[in-house]
Image (cartoon, rainbow, N blue to C red):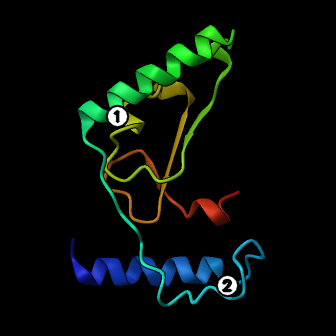
Amino acid sequence: MNKSKKKLAISERNLLWKDNNEIPKWVNKNKVDLDQFYTRKDIAKKYFDSLLDYLKKDGVKLDNCLFIEPSAGDGSFFDLLPEDRRIGLDIMPMKKGIKKKDFLSWK
């Protein structure tokens, strides 16, 4: 990843966190990294299918679900979600359709 893009993303995140009361005061925002991890597509598919099975067994009507992917990254899970019922967020989105937002300050 480009270091300048990462630095910019951290700066933008820190601005969003500035007035966020959900972030504990003891957190040193300048030392918290982006903690990025990109799930392999086959692993995402396996766990998404498992989630769908669980929801169906629990009687959840999937047509009523809005799926929110809070750290969508390169879209491994996001791509599996129904296009008309998904929201993807990421501080540094790597794919079209994912909103450049921080989940902890998103409204």
- In front: 94, or 104? 104
Image quadrant occupied by the N terminus: bottom left
Q: Secondary structure at mark 2?
A: loop
Pinpoint residue 93: horizontal percent, then vertical percent.
38, 58
Residue at x 49% of width, y 90% of height = 30
Please give the name of the residue rendered at 53% of the width and 76% of the height, measured from the top-left corner. 13
Q: Is residue 80 above or below residue 61?
A: below
> Is residue 66 shown left or right of residue 96?
right
Q: Quadrant of residue 97?
A: top left
Q: Identity of the amino acid at label 2?
A: Lys
The span from disc 2 to disc 1 (Cα, nearest Å) is 33 Å
Q: Name the outermost residue toward the left.
A: 2
Question: Mark 2 or mark 1: which comes first in sequence?
Answer: 2
Q: Residue at 59% across / 59% down in the picture?
A: 103
Judging by the rendered image, the residue that carries numbered circle 2 is 18
Residue 86: % across, % down: 53, 34
* Label 1 SS: helix
Local crowd size for mark 1, using a 10 Å CA cut-off: few (<14), some (14–19), many (≥20):
some
Residue visible at 27% across and 84% down in the picture:
4
Q: Residue furthest right?
A: 21
Query: Is 26 on the left or on the right of 103, as rendered?
Result: right
**Residue designated by label 1:** 44
Q: Position of residue 33 (x, y in %)?
A: 42, 78
Q: Check residue 83 in the rendering and tell me which mark sits there, or answer none.
A: none
- Please state, as top left, top right, bottom left or bottom right, where the C terminus lies in the image: bottom right
> Is 27 on the left-hand or right-hand side of 77?
right
Q: Nearer the viewer, residue 38 or 54?
A: 54
Which amino acid type is shown beneath numbered disc 1? Ala
Q: Quadrant of residue 80?
A: top left
